[in-house]
């Protein structure tokens, strides 16, 4: 339907609109015109259209001159034939006169007329009509007589040099006039209508034009068919490749062809097979990774818990004084850190494999922010940073949908990062209501994140290489778990950062009652 619309209906509408349409239609028209042009260009770029057009142009380039040439040749041939015949008869009559057998004028014109099928006139040396004879249906040749006739020459040169001829066009008709000067000053004039031969030539040209037209249509149809046969598999393969690029693995294509198209299909099938195998391997590895975190994590946690219990048991003992006490504290801290790392890794893995069921409830933004910000207020102030909270009261009152505990983990990570990495300036938390969602942003005036590392900060254990406070308790897991939590909510965690200026981390939270 689309091709018909743009090639037939839309231009028709445009033409109609041309007739006294209101001004407001002009913009509509220009859009439509632009679309028609764009579609035409696109249409012309299709391989099959280009092949068909090339065939047609080639055909026209050769066929049209050939047709014109052929029709001309037919005309010339018959005209030549008539001319020769009429000349020959004229010459024969002249030679008969030369030999002294003038004969009767009327029987002369009658015989010539009979032989050549023309109207014959015989003029005397003073130009007066001596005899005439009409042949067949040529009654209209009287009008030719009003046409200036070549004046008889006063001196009569040898017979063969005195034969003259010319073509006369009267209206749409063409006549051949042959004039022969006979001895004794007589002029023999033969006038033959070329109507029949022009008719034959016209018919012939009609037949040639029609058969060429049919030939052209057949040619275009064949060109379309041939090129469609070539382009159809290419189009199929294009869709096939696009599906691979989009990450969907289509079933193998069953295009079999002995040419390059077949080779391309085979190559794409091999890619699909390889990708399928790789995906399967990856799936197996993912399962192994999940099992590893689940099993090994638990296995690691058990002795660790025991160590922590033991350490807790001896905490506060008088034996832990001085350096021993410091070593004890460090060991206890590291055990705690290790516990945290193992817990976080297991959590990330569970989030990744959808093994955590989110407790989606109504969460009050105000309450959530109050509890989280409260934990970091002191840390921010003690660094001499400004803490700006730009949450309008109406936003604070908004109820959101989500897992309150996990959303708290996300906000804690973002605010703690902003507080820890910023040395001067401010940490600002602000909200924007965009109807369906509430966008919450944590902005800081910290060092910023280099452009080439920005995607990597969400990887497990990744920490920016540039000089940044690398506190002993940092694990490089905060943003990884935050991102997984947001993805489990079907939301994203976005970052904008400019080196030396600061960073902005935003989350989009779903408002209650919004689809
Ligand atoms: N606001 C920020 N400004 C500058 N760099 C940041 C900021 N937030 C994160 N980064 C960079 O991204 C890295 C990863 O952050 P992430 O929160 O995952 O780990 P971490 O803060 O180093 O450790 P953890 O969160 O476990 O305490 C950080 O080490 C830091 O280099
Ligand atoms: Mg962090």
Image: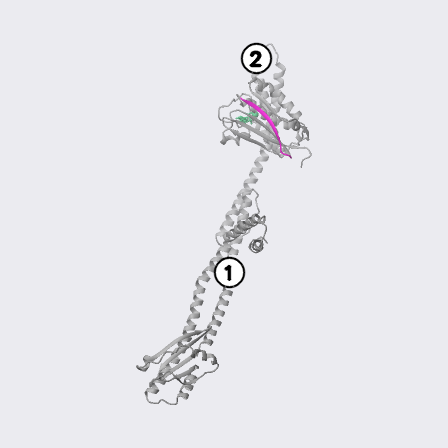
Question: Which residues fall within the magenta stretch?
Answer: 425-435
- Left/right placement of residue 515 relative to residue 452 reads right
Q: Position of residue 177 (x, y in %)?
A: 40, 78
Q: Position of residue 403 (x, y in %)?
A: 66, 30
Mark 1 nearby-residue class (10 Å; few <14, some 14–19, many ≥20): many
For the residue labelled by badge 1, is the local secondary structure a helix, a strand or a loop? helix
> Colour scheme used in the picture?
one colour
* Residue 426 magenta: yes
Marks 2 and 1: CB-CB under 8 Å? Answer: no
* Residue 1 magenta: no
- The CA span between labels 2 and 1 is 95 Å
Mark 2 nearby-residue class (10 Å; few <14, some 14–19, many ≥20): some
Q: Quadrant of the N terminus?
A: bottom right
Q: Position of residue 200 (x, y in %)?
A: 47, 74
- Left/right placement of residue 358 relative to residue 53 reads right
Residue 295 at least partly seen: no
Q: Main secondary structure of the magenta part?
A: strand
- Left/right placement of residue 317 relative to residue 104 reads right
Look at mark 1 in the image and give the residue it sits on.
220
Look at mark 2 in the image and give the residue it sits on.
325
The residue nearer to you, when weighing 417 against 121, is 121
């Amino acid at each position: 339907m689309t091709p018909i619309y743009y090639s037939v209906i839309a231009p028709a509408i445009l033409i109609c609109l041309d007739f006294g349409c209101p001004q407001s239609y002009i913009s509509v028209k220009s859009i439509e015109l632009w679309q028609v042009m764009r579609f035409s260009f696109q249409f012309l770029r299709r391989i099959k259209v280009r092949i068909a057009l090339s065939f047609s142009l080639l055909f026209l380039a050769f066929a049209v001159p050939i047709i014109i040439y052929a029709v001309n040749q037919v005309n010339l041939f018959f005209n030549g034939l008539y001319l020769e015949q009429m000349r020959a008869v004229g010459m024969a009559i002249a030679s008969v006169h030369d030999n002294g057998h003038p004969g009767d004028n009327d029987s002369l014109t009658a015989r010539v007329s009979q032989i050549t099928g023309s109207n014959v006139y015989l003029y005397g040396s003073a130009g007066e009509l001596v005899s005439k004879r009409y042949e067949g249906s040529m009654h209209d040749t009287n009008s030719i007589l009003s046409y200036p006739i070549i004046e008889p020459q006063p001196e009569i040169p040898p017979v063969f040099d005195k034969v003259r001829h010319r073509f006369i066009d009267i209206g749409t008709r063409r006549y051949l006039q042959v004039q022969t000067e006979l001895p004794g000053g007589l002029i023999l004039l033969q006038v033959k209508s070329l109507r029949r031969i022009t008719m034959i030539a016209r018919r012939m040209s009609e037949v040639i034009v029609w058969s060429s037209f049919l030939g052209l249509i057949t040619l275009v149809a064949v060109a379309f068919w041939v090129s469609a046969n070539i382009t159809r598999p290419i189009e199929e393969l294009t869709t096939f490749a696009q599906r691979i690029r989009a990450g969907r693995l289509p079933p193998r294509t069953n295009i079999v062809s002995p040419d390059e198209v077949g080779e391309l299909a085979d190559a794409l099938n091999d890619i699909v097979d390889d990708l399928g195998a790789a995906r399967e391997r990856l799936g197996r590895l993912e399962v192994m990774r999940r099992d590893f975190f689940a099993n090994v994590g638990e296995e690691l946690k058990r002795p660790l818990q025991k160590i922590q219990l033991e350490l807790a048991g001896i905490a506060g003992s008088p034996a832990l004084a001085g350096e021993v006490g410091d070593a004890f504290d460090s060991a206890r801290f590291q055990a705690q850190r290790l516990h945290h790392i193992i817990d976080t890794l297991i959590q990330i893995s569970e989030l990744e494999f959808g093994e955590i069921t989110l407790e989606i409830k109504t969460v009050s933004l105000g309450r959530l922010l109050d509890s989280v910000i409260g934990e970091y207020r002191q840390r921010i102030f003690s660094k001499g940073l400004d803490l700006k909270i730009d949450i309008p009261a109406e936003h604070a009152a908004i109820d959101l949908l989500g897992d309150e505990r996990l959303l708290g983990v996300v906000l804690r990570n973002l605010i703690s990062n902003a507080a820890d990495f910023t040395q001067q300036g401010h940490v600002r938390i602000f909200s924007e209501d965009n109807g369906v969602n509430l966008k919450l942003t944590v902005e800081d005036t910290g060092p910023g994140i280099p452009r080439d590392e920005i995607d990597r900060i969400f990887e497990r254990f990744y920490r920016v290489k540039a000089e940044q406070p690398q506190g002993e308790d940092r694990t490089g897991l905060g943003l990884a778990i935050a991102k997984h939590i947001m993805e489990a909510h079907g939301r994203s965690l976005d970052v904008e950062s400019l080196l030396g200026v600061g960073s902005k981390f935003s989350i989009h939270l779903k408002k209650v009652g919004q689809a």
